[in-house]
Image (cartoon, rainbow, N blue to C red):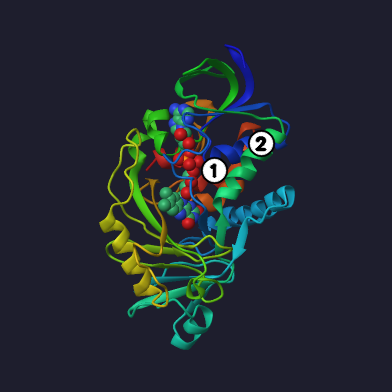
Amino acid sequence: MSEHAEVEVLVVGLGIHGSAAAYELALRGVRVAAIDQFAEDHHRGSSHGRTRMIRRAYPNPVWSDLVERAFAGWERWERASGETLLHRTGGLYAHRGTSQLQGPGCEIVEDTDRLRELMPSFVVPDGHQAVFDPSAGVVEAGTALGVARAGARAAGAELVFGERMLRWQASGEGCLVETSARRIRARSLVLATGAWVGRAVPRLADLFEVWRIVTVTLRSGQPPARPPWLGAFSVDRPEGLLFGIPDAAGNGFKAGIDAGEVWDPERPVVPPTGGEISELCRLMTRYVPGVDADPERDVVEAASCLYTMTRDRRFVLGRLPWAQPVVVAAACSGHGFKFGPAIGAAVADLCRGEERRDLDFVGVERRLGQ
Ligand SMILES: Cc1cc2nc3c(=O)[nH]c(=O)nc-3n(C[C@H](O)[C@H](O)[C@H](O)COP(=O)(O)OP(=O)(O)OC[C@H]3O[C@@H](n4cnc5c(N)ncnc54)[C@H](O)[C@@H]3O)c2cc1C
């Protein structure tokens, strides 16, 4: 594109949500350009790595419709690409005291024999209540990101890496955006900037806190870590919830803790330390005692990633009330990946002027009213 390029929609940020938005917009025939400040394979944000968890079990039924749209969206992307994006393994979620999780098909399981039958490798600690979600499983995150970007390009979107948005201004019927390379006029601007959302929209900055999160992946091929012996799981702990993603399709058994130090995304995220890796290995063998988790021998990947947290763990998704051409897509708080195709479709609807009252529970106005 030349200087003062004109597009219908400019998407800023090419993590899973910006990539999904570009794909879904291009599929609808919209002329879309998308930029990211880093290289295509960067590890500075939240969407890198091979796998993520998907589940219907959520703490509030207000999520149910978006969850259904997500499952339907992954299946649609699978049909379009010919790739396998979901592995259904079932999921067991253990909470201290009483679990608040619910969802279609979910079942509270208290009987130890039944727990063992559902997921033989996973030990639910005493004093915890477990919820089983038969539709939970593993998203092939790396493949999904590739499918979204390839699909967007094939449908005519322009994706540019290594170009940073410096500032934007809503003007008249659209937006004027200045990047590190050019100026772009767009009818709509989508800000899918992940941990940088507070920089992109300073008036929303107080809603978010960015955390550094660490994960460890064990070598593939250990039967106790594979479905059907192990599915997706989590254990609620005072020090932070431990989540586990089984070794489906050779991706290895991955675990992480839903807590970490506050991090400035402008600083490259520091890789996991030896102590952090050892602690995760210890927890993996504590809750899945059949696996080998020697930090030297069995760990194939230790990664750091950013969570962008809101206080109530809900997303911030919708038009800016004071700048209508701008759509913010912050599907964050450590559980947004599973919604990729649904967020992309929602953004496409909003950019095309459609009403999405179903998204009011994560809407910008609701958040500002808190
Ligand atoms: C360790 C870990 C485990 C997780 N596990 C799960 C899980 O099991 N299930 C699940 O559903 N979710 C999970 N999540 C959450 C999920 O991965 C995130 O919600 C999701 O990836 C967020 O994607 P995004 O596109 O919003 O952000 P990002 O992937 O961070 O993308 C934002 C992009 O915007 C770009 N950008 C920012 N500012 C600018 C600018 N000014 N100009 C140009 N580009 C800019 C950045 O470079 C970045 O590439 C996990 C996250 C982590 C970190």
Q: Which residue is mark 1?
A: 16
Q: Does residue 203 sit above or below 252 in this rendering?
A: above
Q: Is residue 333 above or below residue 205?
A: below
Q: Is residue 269 above or below residue 186?
A: below
The mark that comes first in sequence, 1 or 2, is 1
For mark 1, give the secondary structure: helix
Secondary element type, mark 2: helix
Q: As displayed, is residue 292 above or below residue 75?
A: below
Q: Residue furthest bottom?
A: 113
Q: Please name the residue shown 59% across and 21% down the image.
A: 186
Tell me: is circle 1 under 8 Å from ligand 1: yes
Residue toward you, 58 or 73 = 73
**Residue neighbourhood size for the residue with mark 2, other residues' Cα within 10 Å, grouped as few (<14), some (14–19), many (≥20):** many
Do the residues bearing badges 1 and 2 touch, measured as CB atoms within 8 Å? no
**Which amino acid is tagged 1?**
Ile
Whole-percent x, y for residue 115 in the image: 47, 82
What's the amino acid at mark 2?
Ala
Query: To which residue does mark 2 refer?
Result: 152
